[in-house]
Image (cartoon, rainbow, N blue to C red):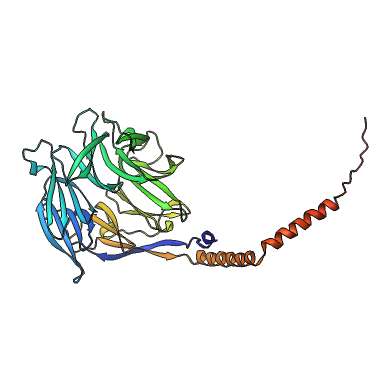
Amino acid sequence: MQNILRTPTGYSFNGLERVASVPVPFPLDICMLQLPSVKYATALHKDAAGVRQFAVYVWRAAEQDYELMLQQPAPKAVALDCLAYAGLGYVALSYNHSEPVMQARDGSPIYELSPERVMRTVQYFAGVHLRGMYLRISSQELTLLQAYEGGGTKRQPSCPYFKWTSGTFQRLGAIPCSNARRLEAFGIDYADYVAVANYASPDGRTSTHSEIYKYEPATRRFQLFQRLRTNGAVDVKYFSLPVNEVSRRHFLIMGNTVGDAGAVGSAGEADTVIYVFDKGEFVPYQRLSFYGLERFLPVTHSVSEKFLLFVACSKQDVKIYNLNDWKFEESTVQFTEGAFSRGVARMRSYEENEQSFIVIANENMAANETNIFQPLYKQDEHANVLRQQIIEWAREQTKRIDAVSLEQLLLALKLKVSEREKHPRKIHIKRVKTKS
């Protein structure tokens, strides 16, 4: 009866509350790091002259604001990622070099943040045409994925992956990838996967395949798990939503930027396909169309109805989608000003005290504008009335069942069967005359 009493509560998205501001000008990315005793905000941004900078801010609880802790030039930086692991913070700053670096410290750095040592460099990567590095926790271990541009060659490139061991990232292998724009690592039922969004094939054709790889413990390698037809894929995201107390639905969003030849719609409009994990594979679940897609941000919650999907497209305001009866629909609540207006470079989310927060890096924003928000929800009154009626009905049925003795029911059933055996029903057959 416990599952019956846990009925939907009819939540709907009702807006965003301004929470705080990381005072970073013209941000390209803002990544939050929550350590046991301190909270950092790492940022990649441009200064007034347009030069890229890497900055670290620390949260001051007494003043309720973020203070700049350090900043350094990063003119070649194209991507940022961060992750908290084992009480420390790790930051991966990706430099896109077109030529081999002469000195190790000119490579793409991995930083370690801690309250005791502030920040130190733990490793450099000297690869050229690096598009991005992704820090993830896989099987309770810190891992690193790297994606590279094609570099103008037609050879099949690869995306290497590393494991944090003895204070350094050691290479374990590589995943085949072709002009990979995004990598997404995730887990389902204790199995580890990596989805690769390939923008184009090695020969430059946007009509290609993006792949999903699964880690095989026996071989200690990622093996091809599934191929998905894509057309200029630029982003891929995984998320899961609760169905009930024991099961979840697993989704994968693959965003395309090139429409199918001859498809109905304006030029540049392409389908984004939402897949659901069903019977051991990802199958198409729903399609959404966008013009100039750039990034997704799924924001999950313990209540599936509180799910939000933020969509950033080129030269457009952010679009917000929510979940309605297990369908992804554009929300009636939209924002067209401030951080959510055109110019969004990166969107992230983080959780604190069981609450979800959204961080928006809009490269057109000044340092004093709000970039951290909290979603707000309201309850549907009609759904609440229905929910209360279901709860009351369930309680009445529970009381009725509890009041009935099973022994009395069994005795009455035996008596009924005995009476049927003593007095069988008479069968009346009607005679009908027919012509031969």
409 relative position to 154: left or right: right
Residue 318: image location, x then y, percent: 31, 54
Q: Look at 13% across and 55% down and name the residue there.
A: 119
Q: Quadrant of residue 202?
A: top left
Q: Quadrant of the N terminus?
A: bottom right
Residue 99: image location, x then y, percent: 10, 35
38 relative position to 8: left or right: left
Observer-nearest of 242 and 100: 242
Q: Quadrant of residue 276?
A: top left
Q: Residue furthest bottom?
A: 62
Q: Look at 57% across and 66% down and name the residue there.
A: 389
Observer-nearest of 92 and 340: 92
Q: Quadrant of the C terminus?
A: top right
Q: Residue furthest left?
A: 102
Q: Look at 26% across and 40% down and name the residue there.
A: 181
Residue 176: image location, x then y, percent: 27, 33
216 relative position to 11: left or right: left
Q: Quadrant of residue 367?
A: bottom left
Does the rendering let one see residue 28? no
Query: Total number of numbered labels?
Result: 0
